[in-house]
Amino acid sequence: MDTTEIIVTLTGLALSAFVIWYFFFSARQTAAAVSTSSGVQEVDITVKGGYSPDVIEVERGKPVQLSFYRDEENSCSEELLMPDFSIRRDLPAFKTTLVELLPQQAGTFTFTCGMGMLRGSLVVK
Amino acid sequence: MEPTTKTETLDIEGMTCASCASFVEKSLTRTPGVQRAMVNFATEKATIEYLPAQATPATLKEAVVKAGYGVTERAPDTSAADRQAEIDQQKALAYVKLKRRFWVATVLAIVIMPLSMLMLWPAMMARVNMQWLNYGLLVLTLPVLFYSGREFFTSAWNGFKHRAANMDTLIAVGTGAAFLYSLAATVVPGWFMRRGLMPEVYYDTTATIIALILLGKVLELRAKTQTSAAIKALMGLQAKTARVVRPDGQEVDVPIEQVQLGDLVVVRPGEKVATDGVIEEGRSAVDEAMLTGESLPVEKKTGDPVFGATLNKTGSFRFRVTKVGADTMLSQIVKLVEDAQGSRAPIQRLADKVSAIFVPTVVVIAILTFVLWFDLAPVEARLPLALVNFVAVLIIACPCALGLATPTAIMVSTGKGAEHGVLIRNAEALEKAHQVNTVLLDKTGTITRGEPAVTDFVPAEGQNAGQLLQVVAAVERQSEHPLAEAVVRYADAQQAPAIPATGFQAIEGKGAQASVNGQAVLIGNFRLLDEAGISLSPAVRRQADELLGQAKTVLYVAVNQQAVGLIGVADTVRDTSAAAIKRLQAMGIEVVMMTGDNPQTAAQVAAQVGITRYFAEVLPSGKAGKVKELQAEGRIVAMVGDGINDAPALAQADIGLAMGGGTDVAMEAAGITLMRSDLQGVVTAIELSRQTIRTIKQNLFFAFIYNTLGIPVAAGLLYPFFGILLSPMLAAGAMALSSVSVLTNSLRLRSFSPAKN
Ligand SMILES: [Cu+2]
C-alpha cells in the first residue's frame, strides 16, 4: 500500500462515516405548532429539497393546520403524502397549500413526497 | 348540542406581516356572533365560524375593514375542479420545460459522443490537438450540465441542507464527479502525465447520463398524469350550469355555484342533472353509469332521488335541490377516491423503510467502491477505474422504482374501481380484499332485491285471470303501500290495461277497498276478508296455505263479497345473484348466506343461487357473531350487507362491503362501498383487489431485484470473475427504464374489466 492509497482509504472511510452521521444521526430541526386564539395549531413549512422544519410537534385532539409553501419547481416535491391521515395533495410551485387534520392519537407520523424520499414527521403528544 | 354555525372564507387584502394577521384575527374574534376566526398570513385568507343569527358575511367584512384591511371580492369559482385545473396547468408547463431541457441535452450528447471517440482512430488522433479537442468538449458539456442538469444540482443541494437525500443527490454527485475529473484532465493534463496517467475525459459520460435520465423523467411524467386520469374524469363530470325555476315561473340558467338548497331545477332530455335532489314533477330514465357503473338507465318518477352529473335520457322533469357543492354524491365519491389514493398499503411498509435510508446508503456503497478499486486495481489504471465504478453505482441505484411501486398501482386501481361503481376506502381495504376466502352475504337486499314482488297470481276457479288482474291493479294503483306497488309493477309488466277505480279507501293494517266497474273490491290480508264476513272455499284455503308454506305474504282478493283470488308476494332473488355467486366460487371463495328467515325458506333461496352453507333465523343483533364464528374457523371474511343493522357485522368482518342504496352508517363501517345494487360488484371488488395486489407485488419484486442486482454489478463485483464492468452510460439507461417500467406495469391496471358470466 502506498501513501496515496492510505490517504484515499482514510478519506473514503471518513466520508462514509460523515454521510451516515449527517443523514441518520445528526439533530433535526424541530418546531412546535403555534396555537391561535381559536385553538387551531398552525405550522408553516417550507418545501425546498426537504421540509423545514421537518419535525413538527403538535398536541393531540386539537385541529392542526399545516401550510406548505413549495419554494421550488423540482418535481420531487410536487406531491405530499400523509398516509396515516389519508392525505395526498399536489403542492403547486411557489404557492401555499393548506393541509388540515385532527390528530387523535399520540405518536410519530411521517409525511413524505410522492416517492418517499423527502421526509418529515408529525409528532403528536 | 351546539347551535349550528356557518363558515365563511374571506380573502384579506393589505396584510404585510404575521402581526397584521393576528390583528385581523382579533378584530374578527371580537365581532358578535363569531365563534372562531383564523387568519392565515401566507394564503391571505380568513376562515370564520359564526352564528348566522348574530353575524352575516357583511358584518364580518365590516370588521376586517375597521381593522384597516380590505376584503377581496372572490370570484365564486374556486372549486376543486378549478384548483385542479391550475395544478394541471403548472404541470403542463413543467413538462414543456423538462422536454426542452431533455432535447438540449440529447442533441449535445449526440455531438459529444462521436467527438470523444476520436481517440479510437489513431489516424484521426494524429491530426487533432488533444488539448483543443478537450476544451471543445468542455464547452459543449457546460450547457448540458448547467442548463439541462441544473435541477439535479439545486435539488441535491437543497436536500443536503435539510439532511435529506433523493435521487437527484445520486445524479448530481455522479455526474459532478465525472465532470470535475474531466475538467481537471482538460485544464492541468500535465499533473496526470507526471503521475503516469492518461488525462482522459468523461464529458460523453456526463452528457449522456443527463440526457438519459431526463428521458426517463419525461416518460415518467407522461405516465404519471395517466395514473390520475380516472379521478380527473370524475371531477370533469360536474355540470357547469343549472336551469333554475324562479318563483315567478321563469326558467334561468345559472352557474352551478349559485344553485341553492331548495331551488327547483328543470332537466330536459339529453341534459346532465346539475346536482342532487328529489323529483317533484315528471318522469324519465336516467343514465347513472358514471356514478354507479350500472349500464342500464334507471327509471325515475316523482319522489325519486336524482344525482348530479348523471345523464337524463328520455323525459323532462323538475327536481328540488337537496344537496350542493361538497355534499353531492359526485363530490363524495371524488373525496373518497382521493382519500384512498393518499392512503398507505401495509404491503408498502418494507419499501418505505428501505427508501428512507436508500440514498445515503448508496452514497456510502459508492465511496467504498471507489476506495476498493483504488486500492486493488493496478496503479496506472486505478484512478479512472475507481471513478467509473463510483459513478456507475450512484447512477444505477433507483429509489424511485421502490417509491412508485405501490402508490401508482393504488391510484390507478381506486380510480378504476370508481369507474365500475366500486368505491375503495383505502389501500388497506384493497389489500384485505385480496386475501378474502369467504364471503358472507346478508340475504335481504344483497342476494334478493330487498323489496317485495309478486311471485304468484292465483285466480279462484272460474275466474278470468286477465280481467281479475285489471280489477286488482285498478284498486292498488290508488294505494301507496309497498305491497300494492309490487302488484302494480306486476300488472304493468303483464301489460294489463289500466281501468279506473272509485271510492278508494285504505284500511289501516289490513288492506284497501274500492269499487271497480260497479263491483265492490276488497284486497288485503285474511283478517280483512274475515271481518267482512267472507269465507274462503276449501280450494282457495289450500292454495293460500301452500303459499304461506313457501314463506310468502298472501293478499286475498274479494269481489262482491266473494273470494276470487290470491296473490303471493315475496322478496325475490336478483337476476344477477346466481351468476355472481358462481363466479365467486370459481375464484375459490366460499359463499355463505345468512338470513332471518326460517330454515326452510333459507334452504330454498340458498339452493336457488347455488349456496351450500347458510345460517337461518339470525337475529339482527346476531349478525356480527356469525362473522366471528366464521373467523374463528380461520377464515378471512368479507361481509356484504346493506342495512343499518349490518354495520356491526361489516365492521367485525376482515373487510366489509356495503351495497348501494346502503345507508351512510353502513358505508361508514365498510371498507368498500358498492354503488350498484347487485352482487356483481362483489366480484368486481375482489377481482380488482387481486389484480392490484399482484401488480404491486410484481412492482416491488422488480424494484428490489433491480437494485440488489444492479448496485453490485455497477460496483464491479463481476469484474474479478467475468471481466464485466458496467459503463455509467448503460447504468443511466437502466435507471431511467426501471422507474418507467414500474409505472407502465401499474398503468396496465387501466385495462381492468370485471369478468362477466
Ligand atoms: Cu430513479
Image (spheres, rainbow, N blue to C red):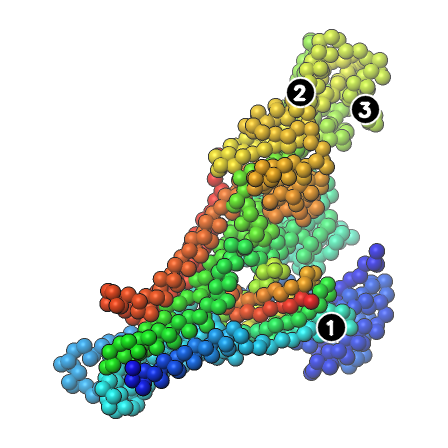
The number of numbered badges drawn on the structure is: 3
Where is residue B2? Give x, y as percent: 83, 58
Residue mark closest to the camera, 2 vs 3: 2
Disc 3: which residue: B510
Is label 1 in contact with label 3 (beta carbons under 8 Å)?
no
Front residue (pair B200, B10): B200
* The image quarter in which residue B737 lies: bottom left
Picture residue at 78% right of the left edge, 22% below the top: B524
Q: Residues within 10 Å of mark 3 (few under 14, many from 20)?
A: some
> Do the residues at pointers 2 and 1 share their chain?
no
Query: Which residue reaches farthest left?
Result: B123
Where is residue A90? Give x, y as percent: 56, 66
Residue B541 to residue B509: above or below: above
Query: Disc 2 or 3, which lies upstream in sequence?
Result: 3
Picture residue at 69% right of the left edge, 31% below the top: B618
Disc 1: which residue: A35
CA gap, disc 2 to disc 1?
Answer: 66 Å
Disc 2: which residue: B550
> Do the residues at pointers 1 and 3 share their chain?
no
Q: Let me know if residue B151 appears in the view.
A: no
Query: Which amino acid type corresponds to the residue marked 1 in the rendered image?
Result: Ser
Q: Residues within 10 Å of mark 1 (few under 14, many from 20)?
A: some
| Chain of residue at mark 1 | A
Dividing the image into four equal quarters, which quarter contains ligand 1? bottom left
